[in-house]
Amino acid sequence: MTVVIDKTISGPRHPEKANRPDSAILRKPDWIRVKAPGSREYLATREIVRAHNLHTVCEEAACPNIGECWSHRHATMMIMGDTCTRACAFCNVKTGLPGALDADEPKHVGQAVAQLGLAHVVITSVDRDDLPDGGAEHFARVIRAIRTASPTTSIEVLTPDFLRKDGAIEVVMAAAPDVFNHNLETVPRLYLTIRPGARYFASLRLLQRAKELAPQGFTKSGLMVGLGEKREEIMQVMDDLRAAGVDFLTIGQYLQPSRKHASIARFWTPDEFKALEATARAKGFLMVAASPLTRSSYHADTDFAALKSARRATQASDGA
């Protein structure tokens, strides 16, 4: 992931959204507010990321949890540059034609992970539809570099959908990440407007294939709410994910990056998130994280430990 502080972006960040009409940005409720970052630990994390010339989704996607996470040295690395080939209506990552892959990036990511002393790391990326394999081999190289530099660190990958990239998921899973994550993001009905470059059932099949390739590994996916979805549609997505063998579901509130992005239909309340979590657990997910500020990599380290414990408990119960 890339840090963009002190960097200037040539041209508009989202050229494909420039001609869209402005939409109102709803005032955030009290439960969505966070403290501005700036602690000593936050600054130290930022310096390590900068020193290795890396990008982070924390900054590129304007994550509201950056202050908390970076204060604990939990930076989510975004590989393969800071420019995405997709134009999702919800996303703050810069769009356009990406540059060439940095052959030294895997080594730099491994060094940064070791220097940060991470017990668990999340590696994500921009979409790279321009690459023949969608960047799958680059993901594999990053995984191997982390294992060399920091052998005890568990690795979670949050990948693109590798749409029409035959064999890509096999390459990633051959590198044996501890957790494979791919976010469905929203309900099928909203894909055309929110995630137009993706296909719901292709993403679902990607998660299913990851589980087929590594039955003992963990799979994970995430949803945003607040885009106009109905509760019944979320229930159906939960069922689809369980049918695909997904172990861990995250649900968080969509926050609108700018007036040119998809508008917020409403803010779901903390009690509604608790109800979604209870429903998801009843449907059989090993782990569920659901709150207004939940994001895919939020508390990923402690959640991974809880995920392993949940599986052990389930296996012990099944064997009783």
Image (spheres, helix red, strand yellow):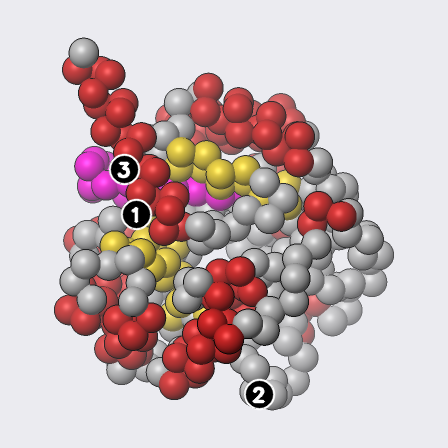
Residue marked by disc 1: 179
Q: Quadrant of the N terminus?
A: bottom left
Which residue appears at 37% of the width and 58% of the height?
Answer: 122
| Distance from Cα at disc 2 to Cα at disc 1 | 33 Å
Residue marked by disc 2: 6
**Can you tell which mark lies on residue 308?**
3
| Distance from Cα at disc 2 to Cα at disc 3 | 40 Å
Which residue appears at 43% of the width and 42% of the height?
Answer: 221
Residue type (three-letter) at the residue carrying disc 2: Asp
Can residue 236 be seen in this snapshot?
Answer: no
| Distance from Cα at disc 3 to Cα at disc 1 | 11 Å
Q: Position of residue 306 (x, y in %)?
A: 34, 38
Q: Quadrant of residue 303?
A: top left
- Dot 3 falls on a residue whose secondary structure is helix
Q: Position of residue 280 (x, y in %)?
A: 49, 26
Do the residues under discs 3 and 1 have CB atoms within 8 angstroms?
no
Earlier in the chain: of badge 3 and badge 1, it is: 1
Image position of 129 with respect to 44: above or below: above
- Residues in magenta, as a range: 210-223
Image position of 270 with respect to 86: above or below: above
Do the residues under discs 2 and 1 have CB atoms within 8 angstroms?
no
- Dot 2 falls on a residue whose secondary structure is loop
Number of residues whose C-alpha sits closer than 10 Å to that of mark 3, classed few (under 14), some (14–19) or many (20 or more): some
Q: Quadrant of the C terminus?
A: top left
